[in-house]
Image (cartoon, rainbow, N blue to C red):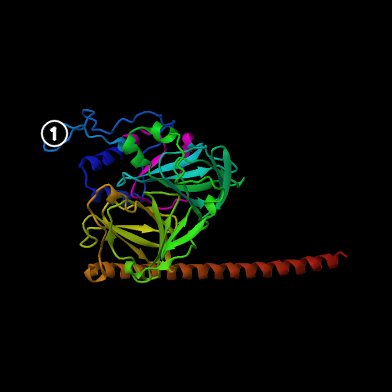
Amino acid sequence: MSNLLDDLFTGGVSRRKFIELASKAGLALPLANFALSEVAAQSITPAAPAQDGVKFSPANIGGGGRIERDFYRGWIKNSKVPMVEGYSILDAKTAEVQPWPEIEGRGVYLNFSGNVHMDSAIWEIPAGKALVERHHFYEQLVYVVSGRGHTTFTQKGRQDKFEWAEGAMFSIPMNLTHRHYNEDSANPARLLVISTFPFAVQSFGNIGLITNMQYDFEDRFDSSPDFFQRNARIRERWEKANFIKDVRSAEVVLWEERGEGNASMYWDMSGNTILEPHISEFEVGHYKLGHRHPYEAIILTLNGTGFSLAGKNSLGNNDAVKMDWKAGSVVSPPFYWFHQHFNTGATPARYLAITEGDFPKRLGIPLEVEQIEADKEDPAIKRMFEAELQKARGQARHDDEEHHHEQHAHNHDHHDHDHDHADGIAHDHQHDHQHG
């Protein structure tokens, strides 16, 4: 699989072919069961073709001899952390995790292969334990997949804490010393962590710098003990908050420009200048309009069932790949691919999307968001959606009928058991009377 990923980035295999393989493999492709070790706090060797150890720019680029460096791909290739690669995973709550000594817990790094600025990981905190204390020179958002606990945060010798439970989302300000604790003594807790670690690695090429730098970002964190309690509406569908108690039930504001029945809420968190989270909800029997954007996105399904399409140039003419999702699924469409989300379930579907906002524009990337309006949509997409709806409803009826038959059989067995039990009591009573 590692060779296939290298082929993707060197042009040996197309992104479409790669995402098809990822989808067929159950939405998550294991790299290997590596022996784990601490990541060295030293410069990273850039990824390069195996044949000569160095990749040079083509003849018409950079004088034909520039060494092409990719520090993040180098880290991916040489890291020993537990890792999966691809474009999605089916369920963050049940995904397999492995021992991860660096965090003093278990986990898995989600290498979404189309991303070079953002990444994600699942961290599991053992029952009644804590992960290692840390700080980092990059932005980070945390969603609580399962469990309950608290996080301590320390600056200038003062320590405070805030509590969290399943469904909560918070952002750790850059370089703030913190530690996550599991308050359940019987069950592990799981966190989904999204960060700008890849961008930091690509920028500096040095793990030691981004994990050991000593600097207090006072413009992002003011040392206040109520930092993770503030929440203020700043625009129509924007809030400034550093902690959301439960994003699954947080308020959303109607936004039908994105599709009939669509509603959303965005957050400005912890002074972040890159990571931009929002939730979006759309009704039963509806879907979001197809679109693409010049920024990376990591999308967690909070509730509901459905599917997404992703295609490099279009979503019709069999160009798109279909990916099913449910609560707990994590999807990351490749950069600037068209994608579209469809609700085939019996309840409103809601997802949490973390994107880069306007960061690529600040980097000078000359691309704009594009949306496929309803009158420009390939009619085949709506026909496919209606067919998927019928299939889902048929499956739901089948499941209901099976449940009804099972319940009827259970009740029948229970009635027979009660009848036999009553006969037994009568028999025992007669037996006692005869021997009285």
What residue lies at 33% left-to-right and 31% top-to-bottom? Answer: 44
What residue lies at 75% left-to-right and 67% top-to-bottom? Answer: 425
Q: Which residues are magenta?
A: 74-102
Report which residue position mark 1 lands on.
64
Residue 218 locus on image (x, y percent): 47, 43
Please tell me whether mark 1 sits on a helix, a strand or a loop.
Answer: helix
Look at label 1 and name its amino acid: Gly
What residue lies at 39% left-to-right and 33% top-to-bottom? Answer: 209
Q: Quadrant of residue 377?
A: bottom left
Front residue (pair 242, 79): 242
Q: Quadrant of residue 284?
A: bottom left
What residue lies at 22% left-to-right and 52% top-to-bottom? Answer: 366
Residue 98 locus on image (x, y percent): 46, 39
Residue 250 locus on image (x, y percent): 48, 62
Report the quarter where the C terminus lies.
Answer: bottom right
Report the quarter where the N terminus lies.
Answer: top left
Asked if 38 appears above or below 408 in the picture, the reply is above
Residue 289 locus on image (x, y percent): 30, 65
- Within 10 Å of the Cα at label 1, are there few (<14), some (14-19), or many (20+) other Cα atoms? few
Front residue (pair 283, 17): 283
Residue 304 visible here: no
Residue 346 visible here: yes
Front residue (pair 319, 417): 319
Asked if 151 appears above or below 303 in the picture, the reply is above
Residue furthest out toward the right: 436
Left or right for 328, reference 429: left
Is residue 87 within the magenta segment?
Answer: yes
Left or right for 107, reference 79: right
Is residue 94 within the magenta segment?
Answer: yes
Q: Give the number of marks.
A: 1
